[in-house]
Amino acid sequence: EPEVTQTPSHQVTQMGQEVILRCVPISNHLYFYWYRQILGQKVEFLVSFYNNEISEKSEIFDDQFSVERPDGSNFTLKIRSTKLEDSAMYFCASSVGTGRGYGYTFGSGTRLTVV
Amino acid sequence: DAKTTQPNSMESNEEEPVHLPCNHSTISGTDYIHWYRQLPSQGPEYVIHGLTSNVNNRMASLAIAEDRKSSTLILHRATLRDAAVYYCILRDPSDTDKLIFGTGTRLQVFP
């Protein structure tokens, strides 16, 4: 069964450093998303991306965050200057379509630890 | 956003059926009912979705009340691998593309 692949599985970084989280969505999917889950808390929406642009973003997704689909297969989340509170699991997801009740496929996540 | 209410936790024995309830009394006519689950240390996993009619797939069945104010996810024979947090989520695909996760129901399955 097709999978969404995320790398690395775990990243430790120092506060203030830049990190890039990588995702390879399912090849025929057109809609891409990032979510995060702080330990013990709910899964939270960060951003959705379609046709090479952001279609929706949450309040969490401030100027420190950016997304990119650099080569038609990878989908990346960059955090420019990490803070301690950015420590969380980050999940990438993709969907073949939107509307009419399409389901998402999520990756297994990247655990980001900011020290 | 329309809200859902789920019990915090439920328990089941292996190989028994499990009925996970969800209340969504403020559901609108265009909201789809989606179910996802999250196994320990994994990302959320799509389970099933429906609009008005009951739905079946290889993972589960979704029973939707006639007034659509509640629904039930049915696992026909629970396995240890079904231990997870189950989320009932309403989506109006014409409004927003994002999923809004609540706290879900933590299902424990005992051998």
Image (cartoon, coloured by chain):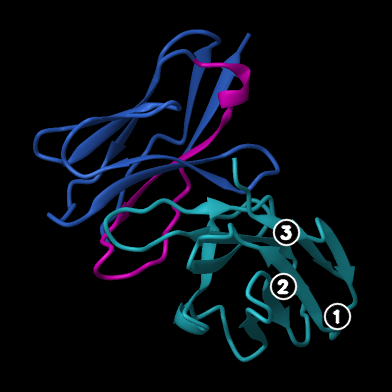
Above-or-below relation of A82 to B71:
below
Residue visible at 28% across and 63% down in the picture = B93
Residue A55 placement (x, y as % from top left)? 43, 80
Above-or-below relation of B20 to B80:
below
Q: Helix or strand or loop: what does disc 2 sit on?
A: helix
In this picture, which residue range is highlighted in magenta? B78-104
Asked if residue B85 is among those painted magenta in the image, a careful observer would answer yes
Circle nearer the N terminus (3, 2): 3
Crowd tier of the residue under label 1, counting other residues whose Cα lies within 10 Å: few below 14, some 14–19, many 20 or above: some
Q: Chain of mark 2?
A: A
Among the chains pictured, the one given cyan colouring is A
Residue A94 placement (x, y as % from top left)? 53, 60
Q: Chain of mark 3?
A: A
- Res A37 → quadrant: bottom right
Q: Is residue A37 something that shows in the picture?
A: no
- Res A1 → quadrant: top right
Per the image, the residue denoted by label 1 is: A15
Q: Is residue B11 left or right of residue A85?
A: left
Q: CA distance from mark 1 to mark 2?
A: 10 Å
Q: CA distance from mark 3 to mark 1?
A: 22 Å
Q: Which residue type does callout 2 highlight? A: Glu
Residue A96 placement (x, y as % from top left)? 44, 59
Q: Is residue B33 left or right of residue B15?
A: left
Crowd tier of the residue under label 3, counting other residues whose Cα lies within 10 Å: few below 14, some 14–19, many 20 or above: many
Q: Helix or strand or loop: what does disc 1 sit on?
A: loop
Q: Colour of chain B?
A: blue
Labels 3 and 2 within one chain = yes
Q: Which residue type does callout 3 highlight? A: Gln
- Name the quarter where the C terminus of chain A is drawn: bottom right
Residue visible at 50% across and 62% down in the picture = A29
Q: CA distance from mark 3 to mark 2?
A: 21 Å
